[in-house]
Image (cartoon, rainbow, N blue to C red):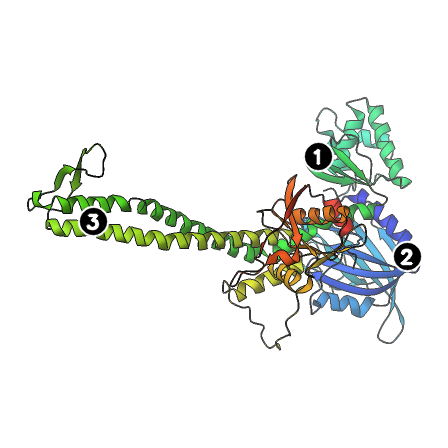
C-alpha cells in the first residue's frame, strides 16, 4: 500500500484546490489514531481525515461517517480550542516527503490574529500530527507524545521546539534530470529499483519497480527517458488514480503498466484513497475494539466443541446398552450352570436364530445373581445416560450455532455494533456487566438496524447483531413486510419495508442478506424470503433466533459495490 511522497503530492494539490480559504467548523477524534475535520469552503462541507495508524497512515477527504467517543480526548480538545472557526490559508508538502503543513489563521483568547501550523507526518509507525505555534515554533500538542528516551534526535512534547525528522539526504526528483539520476546508479551492482529508492525522495519501491519495467533493461538513455516521463507527470500533476487488484491490492496516482490484474480508475486521489482504505480501516477499528470479545466467544465455542465430543463418545458407549441387557437375561436363564468363583460361562444364545454359543464374562468375586444384576444396572445406566446426553447434544449444538453466529456478526460489525454484542453476552449470563464508575445509569438505547435504500427508493433494514435483528423483526417490521435470511447460514435479518416488492428490490435485499452472512465471499448464496407474518420467535429462544415457513429461495452473489451503493447516506 504505497502512500508515498508522490501520492502525498497528488492529495496535497487536490486539497489546495478544494480547501484553501475554508473555515474549520468541526474537529473530532474518533480513535487514538484518527482525526476528522469538517471544513466549509465554497458553500460545501468537506470532511478531512488524518490517520496515524501504523499500517494505514494517510490523509484525504472522506465520505465515511465515524462514531465519536462521548468525551473527546485531550488532543481533540486542544485542537478545538486553537482551531475551531479558523481559516485554512495554505497547504504545503515538505519536498517530496510524506510531511504536510497546514497553515491556519485563527484568533487567540484576546481576539488578536494568531497563526498556527497543523503538521502531519505520515511515516508508518512513526506517524504523528502536531499543532505548532507558527510565531514561536513550539509544539502546542501532538496526537502522540515522543520523549527524549524514545527519540534522541527530537522530542515531540508540548512546549518543545518543532524540528523536522532527520534528513535522508535524497535527491528531489522534481529538481534533477535523468542524467544526474543515471550517474548515481551502479548498474553492475544490480537491484536498480532499490538503488532508486535510496536516491530519490518520495519514491516507493512500487514506483521504482514501474520505472524499471518501463525501461525493460534498456540503455542508460532509456532509463533517463523513463524517469523523465514520471518526472513530467509529477511536475504537471498529470495523475491517473487507480486501485489495482490481483494477487494483492494496491493503488497509485501514476499509471502502473507492469501490474497484472484488474484496474479501477478514480476521478481523484482523494476518492481513490477513501475507497481503498474505507473497509480496511473500519475492520481494523472493529478488530481492536472486539479483540477480547472475539477471543472470549472463540474460547466458549471451543469448550462446547470439546463437550460435544465427550457427549458423542457417551452415545457411542450407550449403543451397547442392549448387549448388557442380553448378557443379564442369558445369565439369569443359565444361573444354575454357574459355579462359585467362575470367570466366564459359555451358554446357548437364544436371541441368535442359529442358536450359536456365546461366552459371558463374570466377576469371580460376585455371586451369579450379583453378576446378573451388574449387567442390568449397566444397561439401565447407559439407557438413562443416552436420553440425557441426546438432550445435551441438542443444547450444545444450539450453543455452538449461537456462538458461530456471534463470531460472524463480529466479522461484519461496525464499531458501534460491538457494544450491543457485548451487552447481549452480559444479559445472557456469559460475561459480567462492565461497571461504569461514578456515572449515572443511562436510559437503554434502542437498537438501530442499518438502513439501505433500494434502487426504487424502498427502505431496507439490516440487523448487524442479534439485538438489531430481534428489534427489526419483532418491533419495527410490519406483518406484510418481506423478511430475508441466508438459508442454513449464519447471517443478518433483512427486512424490506414495503407490502409490494419489485423483483429488483428483492434481488438487492437478497444481496444484502448474502453479504452480511458467513457466505459473504461465496457465489450463488441461497437466501430464503417470506413475509413477517410467517416469522416466529420460539419461547425461551436466544436473542435473534426465529423460525419461519412458507418461504421461497433465490440465489445471489454478494458484491461489495452494490452494498456500498445501497447504503443510506447519513
Residue under numbered circle 2: 20
Query: Closer to the N terminus: mark 1 or mark 2?
Result: 2
| Count of residue discs | 3
Are the residues tagged 1 and 2 within 8 Å (C-beta)? no
Q: Where in the figure is residue 541, as x and y percent of width and height?
A: 52, 60
Q: Where in the figure is residue 309, as x and y percent of width and height?
A: 40, 47
Residue 35 image-quadrant placement: bottom right
Q: Is residue 367 above or below residue 192?
A: below
How many residues crowd mark 3 within 10 Å: few (<14), some (14–19), many (20+)? many
Residue 70 visible in the displayed image: yes
Q: Is residue 428 above or below residue 401?
A: below
Residue under numbered circle 1: 246
Are the residues tagged 1 and 3 within 8 Å (C-beta)? no
How many residues crowd mark 2 within 10 Å: few (<14), some (14–19), many (20+)? many
310 with respect to 412 (left or right): left
Distance from Cα at disc 1 to Cα at disc 2: 37 Å
Q: Secondary structure at mark 3?
A: helix
554 with respect to 177 (left or right): left
The N terminus is located in which quarter? top right
Q: Secondary structure at mark 2?
A: loop
Are the residues tagged 3 and 2 within 8 Å (C-beta)? no
Decide which of 206, 518 is in the foreground and name it: 518
Distance from Cα at disc 1 to Cα at disc 3: 67 Å
Decide which of 88, 492 is in the foreground and name it: 492
Which one is in front in this view, the residue at disc 1 or the one at disc 2? 1
Residue under numbered circle 3: 375
The C terminus is located in which quarter? bottom right
How many residues crowd mark 1 within 10 Å: few (<14), some (14–19), many (20+)? few
Q: Where in the figure is residue 524, as x and y percent of width and height?
A: 65, 39
Amino acid at each position: 500500500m504505497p502512500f508515498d511522497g508522490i501520492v502525498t503530492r497528488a492529495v496535497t494539490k487536490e486539497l489546495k484546490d478544494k480547501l484553501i480559504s475554508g473555515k474549520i467548523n468541526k474537529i473530532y477524534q474518533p480513535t487514538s489514531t484518527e482525526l476528522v475535520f469538517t471544513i466549509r469552503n465554497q458553500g460545501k462541507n468537506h470532511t478531512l481525515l488524518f490517520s496515524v495508524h501504523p499500517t494505514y497512515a494517510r490523509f484525504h477527504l472522506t465520505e465515511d461517517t465515524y462514531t465519536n467517543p462521548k468525551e473527546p480526548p485531550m488532543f481533540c480538545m486542544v485542537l478545538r480550542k486553537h482551531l475551531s472557526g479558523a481559516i485554512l490559508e495554505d497547504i504545503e508538502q515538505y519536498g517530496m516527503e510524506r510531511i504536510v503543513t497546514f497553515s491556519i489563521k485563527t484568533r487567540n483568547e484576546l481576539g488578536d490574529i494568531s497563526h498556527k501550523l497543523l503538521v502531519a507526518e505520515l511515516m508508518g509507525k512513526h506517524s504523528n500530527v502536531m499543532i505548532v505555534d507558527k510565531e514561536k515554533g513550539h509544539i502546542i500538542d501532538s496526537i502522540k507524545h515522543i520523549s527524549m528516551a524514545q527519540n534522541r534526535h527530537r522530542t515531540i512534547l508540548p512546549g518543545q521546539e518543532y524540528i523536522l525528522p532527520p534528513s535522508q539526504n535524497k535527491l528531489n526528483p522534481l529538481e534533477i534530470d535523468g542524467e544526474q539520476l543515471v550517474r548515481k546508479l551502479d548498474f553492475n551492482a544490480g537491484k536498480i529499483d532499490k538503488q532508486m529508492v535510496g536516491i530519490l525522495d518520495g519514491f516507493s519501491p512500487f514506483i521504482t519497480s514501474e520505472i524499471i519495467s518501463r525501461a525493460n533493461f534498456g540503455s542508460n538513455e532509456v532509463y533517463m527517458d523513463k524517469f523523465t516521463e514520471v518526472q513530467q507527470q509529477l511536475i504537471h500533476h498529470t495523475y491517473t488514480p487507480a486501485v489495482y487488484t490481483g494477487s494483492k491490492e494496491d493503488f497509485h496516482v501514476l499509471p502502473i503498466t507492469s501490474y497484472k490484474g484488474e484496474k479501477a480508475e478514480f476521478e481523484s486521489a482523494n476518492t481513490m484513497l477513501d475507497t481503498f482504505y474505507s473497509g480496511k480501516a473500519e475492520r481494523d477499528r472493529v478488530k481492536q475494539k472486539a479483540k477480547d470479545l472475539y477471543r472470549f466467544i472463540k474460547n466458549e465455542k471451543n469448550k462446547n466443541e470439546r463437550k460435544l465430543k465427550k457427549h458423542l463418545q457417551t452415545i457411542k458407549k450407550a449403543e451397547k446398552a442392549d448387549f448388557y441387557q442380553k448378557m443379564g437375561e442369558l445369565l439369569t436363564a443359565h444361573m444354575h450352570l454357574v459355579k462359585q468363583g467362575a470367570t466366564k460361562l459359555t451358554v446357548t444364545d437364544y436371541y441368535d436364530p442359529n442358536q450359536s454359543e456365546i461366552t459371558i464374562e463374570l466377576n469371580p468375586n460376585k455371586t451369579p445373581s450379583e453378576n446378573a444384576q451388574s449387567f442390568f444396572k449397566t444397561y439401565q445406566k447407559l439407557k438413562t445416560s443416552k436420553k440425557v446426553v441426546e438432550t445435551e447434544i441438542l443444547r450444545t449444538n444450539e450453543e455452538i450455532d449461537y456462538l458461530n453466529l456471534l463470531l460472524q456478526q463480529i466479522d461484519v460489525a461496525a464499531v458501534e455494533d460491538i457494544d450491543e454484542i457485548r451487552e447481549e453476552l452480559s444479559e445472557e449470563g456469559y460475561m459480567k456487566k462492565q461497571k461504569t464508575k461514578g456515572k449515572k445509569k443511562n436510559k437503554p438505547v434502542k437498537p438501530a438496524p442499518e438502513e439501505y435504500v433500494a434502487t426504487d427508493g424502498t427502505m431496507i433494514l439490516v440487523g448487524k447483531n442479534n439485538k438489531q435483528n430481534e428489534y427489526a423483526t419483532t418491533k419495527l417490521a410490519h406483518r406484510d413486510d418481506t423478511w430475508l435470511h441466508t438459508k442454513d447460514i449464519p447471517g443478518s435479518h433483512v427486512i424490506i419495508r414495503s407490502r409490494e416488492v419489485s423483483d429488483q428490490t428483492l434481488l438487492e435485499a437478497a444481496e444484502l442478506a448474502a453479504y452480511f452472512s458467513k457466505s459473504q465471499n461465496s457465489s450463488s448464496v441461497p437466501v430464503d424470503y417470506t413475509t413477517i407474518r410467517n416469522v416466529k420467535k420460539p419461547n425461551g429462544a436466544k436473542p435473534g433466533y426465529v423460525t419461519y415457513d412458507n418461504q421461497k429461495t433465490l440465489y445471489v452473489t454478494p458484491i461489495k459495490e452494490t452494498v456500498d451503493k445501497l447504503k443510506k447516506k447519513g
